[in-house]
Amino acid sequence: MLILNTGGTFNKRYNPLTGTLEVPHDEVAIISITSTFSTPIRVQGLLYKDSLEMTHEDREVLAKTIFQSDEDLIIVVHGTDTMDQSAQHVANLGLQKVIVFTGSMVPFSIDPIEATANLAMAIGYTHHALHGVYIVMQGVCGPYNRVIKNRDQGKFDYV
């Protein structure tokens, strides 16, 4: 299994010098969560961005990395605002792999519960899903085009 880290709120940490939340260039949050799991996992950092800053070129890098990976089970830790756009971009490849997008609306560094639950659920989901692209967020799991961020209510819904 491969976990690709693209950044997002999941990874953000408070910078006391600037007074802002920043996406660090590391995998501390993911490794903290997965360090006790028995599933063999390879973690790879990729973009380190807030998803609102992601470009078409960034999505191409993500798609190429997934296409070239040897793993058939892939989780993408991604910001929640444009997760659906990146999932669509990857789905266009039509790969015979299980690709699950997840993230968190609260940074792991502030409260680890949501990030931990979402990543753990994504890991479990990859073992039972058919080839395709999925989103797993806040207890909602399904094909990428059926799980949407409800911005009015601040949660994910299955439609």
Image: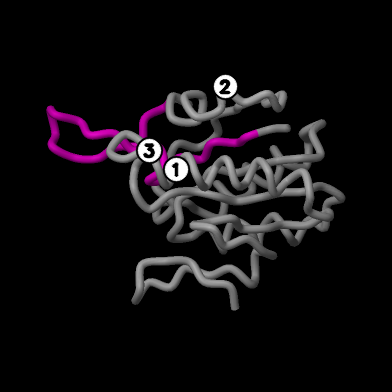
Quarter of the image that includes the N terminus:
top right
* Earlier residue among tags 2 and 3: 2
Residue 79 among those drawn in magenta: no
Q: Which residue is mark 1?
A: 115
Q: Which circle marks residue 36 in the picture? A: 2
Residue 19 among those drawn in magenta: yes
Residue 15 rendering spot, x and y as whole percentages: 20, 31
Q: Which residue is mark 3?
A: 112
Colouring of the image: one colour
* Earlier residue among tags 1 and 2: 2
Badge 3: residue crowd in 10 Å (few <14, some 14–19, many ≥20): some
Taking depth in this image into account, of 68 and 151 the one nearest to the observer is 151
> Which residue is at 43% across, 30% downward?
29
Query: Hey, which residue is sitting farthest right in the picture?
Result: 96
Residues rendered magenta in the picture: 3-25
The answer to which quarter of the image holds residue 147 is bottom right
> Which residue is at 36% across, 67% downward?
154
Q: Secondary structure at mark 2?
A: loop
Q: Amino acid at mark 1?
A: Ala
**Rounded to the nearest whole Å, what is the CA distance between mark 1 and mark 3?**
6 Å
Q: Amino acid at mark 2?
A: Thr
